[in-house]
Amino acid sequence: MTEYNQTIRYIPQQTFSYAAQNPAPTQYSQSIPIEQLSPYNLNQQNSYKNPKQNVPQDTNVNKAQINNLNSQTKRSQICSKQCVVICLICIGILLLIAAAFTVPLVVILTLPTDSNGSLSLYGVQLNLNPSSLPNSWSQCYTATYAANMGTANLNTILSACNKNMLLLGCRQSGHTIMDAAAMGYRADVLYNCATTSNCRNVANGVGWYYSDVYSWGFANGTDSVTRSSCDTSSTNPGYRLCWYTQNNAGYRCGSAIISNTNYEKVIYHSN
């Protein structure tokens, strides 16, 4: 059997510090059969395939597909713009419809109503027909200007006219239309001014004053009063009403000064 002799030598490394202290290892040789070496190619290089070689250097792209994609993209952009325009048009139409219904709705909502206890008239009314009042209103007192309205009579009157809203008015005897009238909440209509000459409580566009020992009445909300004891002011006289409450009869219905039976005092009330 042919043998291949290979000698492996172990040579002490003198560069290390411990080499001088330890004896050098024994040299020996070992014979390895050449048959055991023949299968091995010591000079064989590993075969390696570059993975990049598997990637084709030239990629053929279908130009028709690219053109198709570009066309689809353009169509999508056009559709998006059209959708935006259509949405804006729809919003504009909805705004116009809303505006068309808003004005009548606001008018309806701002109209005074009486069903929930609110006042249906604002300010002093001239030539008021009581039939135009809501159904909740009813007459609770009437008497001529010759009737006395002292403290005792006032207690009786206010017991009969006991609801939350009051309307004071005056008219010629035998007539339905009131020359001057105004409505307000009970607390405003009965605002106690005692004997203060220029006292008035402005509410619902009306200047109210009351005293069971002086006078009771109203004037236009922007006008002053001069109570002595009834109001004698001449500014906008048609918008004024005053009744004596100190055991005297009469005094004014608009610009008319009365102490007889030619005119009537009228009170309505409502909740």
Image (spheres, rainbow, N blue to C red):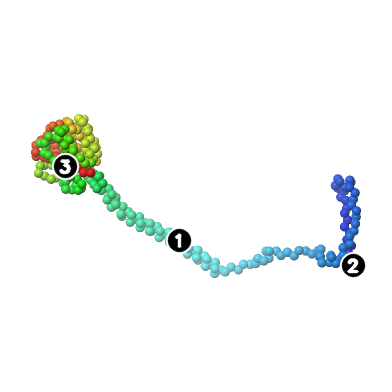
Indicate the position of residue 134 as horizontal and vertical percent values: 20, 48
Q: Are marks 2 and 3 in contact (CB under 8 Å)?
A: no
Give the residue type that dot 3 points to: Cys
Give the residue type that dot 1 points to: Ser
The residue where tag 2 is placed is: 2
Q: Residue at x 84, y 66 (%)?
A: 38
Give the residue type that dot 2 points to: Thr
Q: Residue at x 23, y 44 (%)?
A: 271
Indicate the position of residue 94 as horizontal and vertical percent values: 35, 57
Q: SS at mark 3? A: strand
The residue where tag 3 is placed is: 140
Q: SS at mark 1? A: helix
- How many C-alpha atoms fall within 10 Å of the one at disc 1: few (<14), some, or many (≥20)? few
- How many C-alpha atoms fall within 10 Å of the one at disc 2: few (<14), some, or many (≥20)? few
Q: Nearer the viewer, residue 226 or 247?
A: 247
Earlier residue among tags 1 and 3: 1
Cα distance in 3D space between marks 1 and 3: 72 Å
Q: Image quadrant of residue 206?
A: top left
The residue where tag 1 is placed is: 80
Q: Residue at x 15, y 33 (%)?
A: 152
Q: Is residue 139 above or below residue 246?
A: below
Indicate the position of residue 232 as horizontal and vertical percent values: 16, 33
